[in-house]
Image (spheres, grey):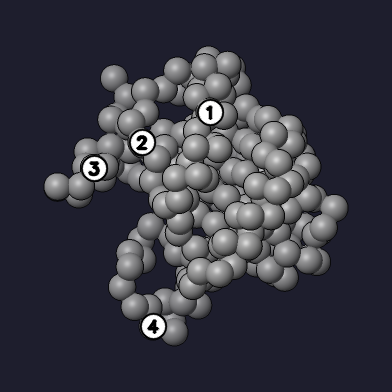
Amino acid sequence: MMLDEHFWYFDSVLTPRFCENVIKFGLQQKEQLARTGGYGERKLNKKEILNLKQKRNSDVVFLNEEWIYREIHPYINRANEQAGWNFKWEHSESIQFTKYKLNQYYDWHQDTWPKPYNHPGRRDHGMIRKLSVTCQLTDGSEYKGGELEFDFRNYDPQMRDETKHLRKATEILPRGSVIVFPSFLWHRVKPVTKGVRYSLVLWNVGYPYK
């Protein structure tokens, strides 16, 4: 799919109080090791955990608080319209509160799956992730590393040059900033080298494109 706009951002729109409340609330919940899609919810053995951490190493909490959805949803709708995507989406999945500590990261990935969800009886059955959202809860001055990067991959493979094709999303660095992007875009979070980065991630699903 060709895009005029690969992501849409809003600078420092979430208030410091909101960011502080989310961090405080998230830290009060029981965290878990973040997983990628292939591992499901089963208990992992040591080898599986080691393999997982080659791809992703961060700690997460899943939230379903209405006051958080209410704050973020208007920016999803505005970005979807203003960027010209106009994707039809139905609802949001659980909110992921993410903590990236020293040396933690998430390597290159897409947020979508190869096929729609096969969850008979569940709300998301037959749907795919269409719009992803990252909300910055920690100001970029409070940590080092942890950069959100995109690889738009709209070039011939033999022309790949990371100095030209990687895009650091510096727009996300101010506290309270929000970035919305199509869930099929390749992106990563580089290792944190100092401090802690707190963020929210939200996936918004709908029926497959027609």
Q: Compared with residue 45, is residue 10 higher up or lower down, i.e. above or below?
A: above
| Label 2 CA crowd tier, 10 Å (few <14, some 14–19, many 20+) | some
Which structural element holds mark 1? helix
Answer whether residue 189 is visible to the viewer in this image: no
Disc 2 is placed on an element classified as strand
The x, y position of residue 148, in whole percent, is 67, 47
The residue where tag 2 is placed is: 91
| Amino acid type indicated by mark 1 | Pro
Q: Residue at x 20, y 47 (%)?
A: 122
Q: Which mark is residue 123?
A: 3
Q: CA gap, disc 3 to disc 2?
A: 9 Å
- Which residue is at a point 78% across and 50% down the rendered structure image? 139
Q: Return the residue at label 4.
A: 45
Q: Residue furthest left?
A: 120
Q: State the separation of the CA atoms marked 4 and 1.
A: 41 Å
Sequence order check, earlier mark of 4 and 1: 4
Which mark is nearer the camera, 2 or 1?
1
Q: Quadrant of residue 133?
A: top right
Measured Cα–Cα span from mark 1 to mark 3: 21 Å
Give the residue type at disc 4. Asn
Q: Amino acid at mark 3?
A: Arg
Q: Residue at x 50, y 77 (%)?
A: 50
Of residues 91 and 9, the one drawn nearer to the viewer in this rendering: 91
Q: Is residue 57 left or right of residue 145?
A: left
Q: Secondary structure at mark 3?
A: loop
Residue 97 % position (x, y): 55, 57
Mark 1 — residue?
A: 74
Query: Is residue 74 shown left or right of residue 94?
Result: right
